[in-house]
Image: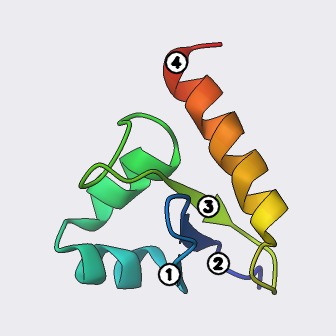
Amino acid sequence: MAKAAQIICLNDGTIYRTQAEAAAALGVHESTVSKAVTGKTRTINDKIYRRYTKDTPPTAEELEEMRRQASAEILGL
């Protein structure tokens, strides 16, 4: 069985183990998290979220690169 992707907040680096955990912590429905991590909506509570599959937290440089990529996606670049 494949490991479920974690959810990461690109603004502060918080990692949630599951989409359900992220939804509960953020006080939103799981579908809202799903839309945010796939880019269908831009943010949740003014923060950017994406799926995260690594076993270790990202370095500051990796997190910054992920932010740049997400910003480019949001801006349509």
Q: Is residue 76 above or below residue 46?
A: above
Q: Earlier in the sequence, mark 4 or mark 2?
A: 2
Marks 1/4 in contact by CB < 8 Å: the verdict is no
Distance from disc 1 to disc 4, alpha carbons, whole Å, reads 27 Å
Kind of residue at disc 4: Leu
Q: Which mark is residue 4?
A: 2
Which residue is tagged 4?
Answer: 75
Residue at 25 percent across and 82 percent down: it is 24
Residue at 52 percent across and 43 percent down: it is 38
Q: Quadrant of residue 19?
A: bottom left
Q: Which mark is residue 51?
A: 3
Which residue is tagged 1?
Answer: 18
Kind of residue at disc 3: Arg
Question: How many marks do you count on the picture?
Answer: 4
Q: Which mark is residue 26?
A: none
Q: Earlier in the sequence, mark 3 or mark 2?
A: 2
Q: Is residue 21 above or below residue 9?
A: below
Q: Earlier in the sequence, mark 1 or mark 2?
A: 2
In the depicted view, which residue is nearer to us: 35 or 26?
26
| Mark 3 crowdedness (10 Å alpha carbons): few <14, some 14-19, many ≥20 | many
